[in-house]
Amino acid sequence: MERLKAKIRSEGQVLSEQVLKVDAFLNHQIDPALMRDIGQEFARRFADAGITKIVTIEASGIAPAVMTGLELGVPVIFARKHQSLTLTDNLLVASVYSFTKQTESTIAVSTMHLSSDDRVLIIDDFLANGKAAKALISIIGQAGAQVAGLGIVIEKSFQVGRAELDAQGYRVESLARVASLADGQVTFAE
């Protein structure tokens, strides 16, 4: 997606050879027009997948997931990272480690929102080591639902996440594949 790549080039900040900061448009301040385009692109790519629900993790995946859900006409569920007084019983849970935050979180989705009848599209802002994707896959599996695919806004293809998901047979569609962050420059994979 060329518009996304241009935004990464112009507003993204390379903090290290492992970390790309995109909080100017994706995961702190959000560019609504770009999110609309991202939602339309994911909807186009997964139009034939029979999606009944979209699942993401709070908070960075919510904007692209909601826009994709709007385009596909399906509900969006976000796995919560924090305990809530209203989210206590009948939970599907998994642990996820965040490389950028250097923390492990327990994420949860209510069993009321996922069932064995669902074909689920996972949407997330980044794919690096695949920890978030694997946690969401676990939750979807606990519900007996089927993972129809993963839509990733930015993939760091120099890390292992994509290869591991491919090896497990999952369909992964990334809108921007970063090959390298060496020397403070973003290099895209084709």
Image: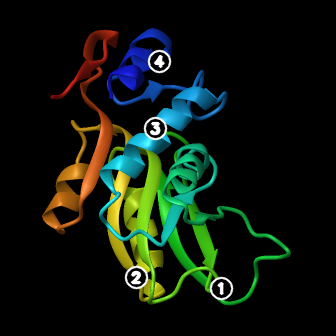
Q: Which residue is mark 3?
A: 38
Instruction: Tell me how far mark 3 sits from mark 4, CA to CA.
Output: 17 Å
Q: Which mark is residue 12?
A: 4
- Residue shown at 46% from the left, 38% from the top: 38
The mark lying in front, picked from 4 and 1, is: 1
Where residue 43 sits in the image (x, y, percent)? 41, 51
Snapshot quadrant of residue 171: bottom left
Q: Which numbered mark, 3 or 4, is in the foreground of this view?
A: 3
- Of pointers 3 and 4, the one earlier in the residue sequence: 4
Please give left or right for residue 111 compared with residue 40 in the image.
Answer: right
Mark earlier in primary sequence (2, 1): 1
For the residue labelled by badge 2, is the local secondary structure a helix, a strand or a loop? helix
Earlier sequence position, callout 3 versus callout 2: 3
Q: CA distance from mark 2 to mark 1?
A: 14 Å
Q: Which mark is residue 141?
A: 2
Task: Report if the CB atoms under discs 2 and 1 are less than 8 Å apart.
Answer: no
Name the kind of residue labelled 4 in the image.
Gly
Q: In which image quadrant can residue 186 be found?
A: top left
> Residue 161's x, y, as percent?
27, 51
Pair 3/1: label in front? 3
Amino acid type, label 1: Met
Regarding mark 1 in the picture, which secondary structure is present there? loop
Amino acid type shown at disc 3? Ile
What amino acid is at disc 2?
Gly
Which residue is label 1 attached to? 112
Badges 4 and 2: C-beta atoms under 8 Å apart?
no
Q: Which mark is residue 1?
A: none
Vertically, is 157 above or below 94?
Answer: above
Q: Is residue 10 visible?
A: yes
Tell which tag, 2 or 1, sits nearer the viewer.
1
